[in-house]
Image (tube, rainbow, N blue to C red):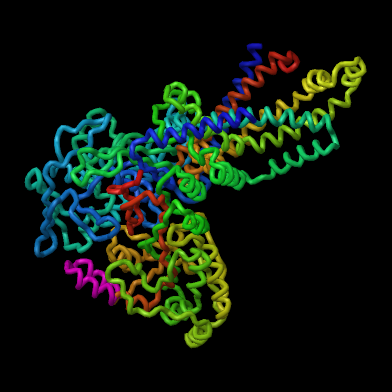
Amino acid sequence: MKKLALLLAASALASAFATSAWSKTLVYCSEASPEGFDPAIYTAGTSFDASSRTVYNRLVEFKHGSTETEPGLAESYTISPDGTVYTFKLRKGVKFQKTDFFTPTRDLTADDVIFSFERQLKADNPWNKYVAGASYEYADGMGFPKLIKSIEKVDDLTVKFTLNKPEAPFLADLAMDFASIVSKEYADKLAADNNMVQMNQKPLGTGPFTFVGYQQDAVIRYQANPDYWGPKQKIDDLVFAITPDASVRAQKLKAGECHIASYPNAADVAGLKADANLKVDEKPGLNIAYLAYNTMQAPFDKPDVRRALNMAINKKAIVEAVFQGAGQVAKNPIPPTMWSYNDKVEDDKYDPAAAKAALEKAGVKDLSMKIWAMPVSRPYMLNARRAAELMQADFAKVGVKVEIVTYEWAEYLKLSKAKDRDGAAMLGWTGDNGDPDNFLDTLLGCDAVGGNNRAQWCNKDFDALVKKAKVTSDQAERAKLYEEAQVVFKKEAPWATLDHSLEIMPMSKKVSNYYMDPVGVHRFNDVDIAE
Amino acid sequence: MLRFILGRIAILIPTFVGVALIAFSFIRLLPGDPVMLMSGERVMSEEKHAQIMHDLGYDKPIALQFVDYLDKIVHGDLGRSVVTKKPVLDDFRALFPATLELSICAIILAVLLGIPAGVIAAVKRGSWLDQTLMGAALVGYSMPIFWWGLLLIIFFSGYLGWTPVSGRISLMYFFKPVTGFMLIDSLLSGQKGAFSSALSHLILPTIVLATIPLAVIARQTRSAMLEVLGEDYVRTARSKGLSPFRVVGFHALRNALIPVVTTIGLQVGVLLAGAILTETIFSWPGIGKWMVDAVFKRDYPVVQGGLLLIAAIIMIVNLIVDVTYGFINPRIRK
């Protein structure tokens, strides 16, 4: 026992030493290990946090805590009147990071920009398949291979993108993680050394933090980049302590082992708020959870039936049960924080009696249906099974029998796309670039039927509005088109819109200047900690 | 003796191929594939999906994939992770020492506490001490590891502040791993306080991982001791006037230990299973969590390679045990 006490005393001493001898270090308890450090080949926010938001920059950036874009590596840009030519003027003297694995000899040029995109877009680029099975999900998802006609170097600091057609969300797309600018000089060196895979293991960019090392599944270390072109960082070191269990992250935060922790359990939030040393920031997430009817199948092909069913769902009860307050009822297919959100749209009132009458009027009797519940917890829907059970009870009240079905996640994603899917499927979406197009056309457009459009809903009026908005460059005009599209959506009711979750970020009171990002990534540039 | 050893090794070869086949088919029996899971909610076109599956070689007939796989294993290539794109063997080498270090500490703790507890319970059979010890063992055996780990963290790290919450060492220490064993590497680093930090990080995960083996060992020791204590030679030893300590400690325990040692050997599997949860709770970067993540992401090469390496280690340990038995007891050799 004495020995144990001695050991504990020694460990207490060690941790006291830890706090006193340490440089100004911010410790972030992250939720999982990054898949890798090349943001072009991944889609998970965890991988972006560890690479694109720390080590890299893009031509344009999202303003901290917002989805508005601002100049990044490009100090200015011009767009041709027809909206098809974007010319970017790069900042002069932007340095790539000096690390123990590579010392750059030149500053950022148009060559780096061209390389960063061409490796993703051209199948014959030697870097396109630098790791087996590399796929550029986001570049493809944003339609870049078909959209971009050419990328040309005008001079060392000027680069010109020519598009095949006007595309209003293009600038927002360029602020996304996959569009991070990598060093061509570093890539050439890796190719010459026959060590291309290192691009995904030891990232090197122009961003606020320099990658120092990654100990698998445990720790990622960064140092403030002394040559950063932007403001000098207020912290010296940044450490990601990978902590997969949410309750343990909460305990680490309380014990002072980390300053910020991601994704707390809903049940832990009250305890974290009560802790005198902590504060809890909240922000509406850029997401939606929905129940998509299969509009190709009777009786769900009738808007009257879908609206009647929507009236039977007590969404408030679902939000309470699943999020314990950390969410809000959704009425539109885009979140309220997004520009063009149409607040004038009235939600279907929860009214079981009216729902029953509407179903009878539509000639629907003794309806039996399936509700698909996701087997996994997602930020927009923490417990799909629970939500499905509540809807089952709600539908029973209006005489509709519900069978809840679920599949293993990969199978769920695959089967729920099918045009002949039997039943209404729950799913959701988190915005990628803050543009309404990324919700409305991606999830509900006619060309997404059989894919992302889980309602298999193709409405000519809606589709015409969102397609027009996509090629319109004036944002006010686009907003009007999207507002109108939301009215059509509500009338047609291809989904029951369920909820938008709140994003919650607990942190030490010592932390200042941390802004929660609507697109769900975590950025630590300009963050400070009181000593 | 040589023939005996060669015979044992000969059995290993078909076993190894069998394990390779099971590892290969197990992950493919699960629905879904790694490419689909990586794209998540974002739908990937059928053509693109087929293209990537082709790039990875997963469009070939299964039998051909298996032959390719065996061929690569023979050449020491376990492939690259579909997710991290790193060689499976590199990841295993980096992560396995963490699991091994934790498992060794856990088994030492389980043996050091389990055997004396079992002996005391047997000697004091039916007393309150026996009932308390065996009651505690039963509770330990039935305890859900996840809950137990969190409870210890909340009490010792949260409430008392005695132990760190999770991780292998304080984040202030930063050195390149030499052996992968944090206790050894921290000593080699020469950094002040590193060793005690590593040791303090081991306390809670060791307790959690040791709990089930400890309970099993204590109960097994008790029942083996009870059997032996009723034997004639123990009565003879007592009647010779030997001290109770000598009777129990030398005459009885030595014979009771044979089934206990077998039980300890069987705990290796329990430790690896327990490591999955323990590593998740304590953010311990070992192979348990690595394998589980790989199963969820259908990372075929990692699951296949990981299972194969774990099985190979267990087979080699078994071989060593068999050969040792052969040396100790010549009857086994025949």
Q: Is residue B26 visible?
A: no
Picture residue at 45% right of the left edge, 37% below the top: B301
| Main SS of residues in magenta | helix
Q: Position of residue A34 (x, y in %)?
A: 38, 43
Give the position of the C terminus of chain A as an image quadrant. top left
Residue A229 point in image, percent of width and height: 18, 44
**Magenta span:** A462-484
Near-viewer residue (A405 or A512)? A512
Could you tell whether A25 is left or right of B331 in the image? left
Residue A149 sits in quarter:
bottom left
Residue A69: tell me if it is visible. yes
User: Horizontal and vertical percent for residue B59?
Assistant: 41, 44
Q: Is residue A351 magenta?
A: no
Is A330 on the left or on the right of A462, as rendered?
right
Quarter of the image where one finds residue B258: top right
Residue placed farthest to the left in the image?
A155
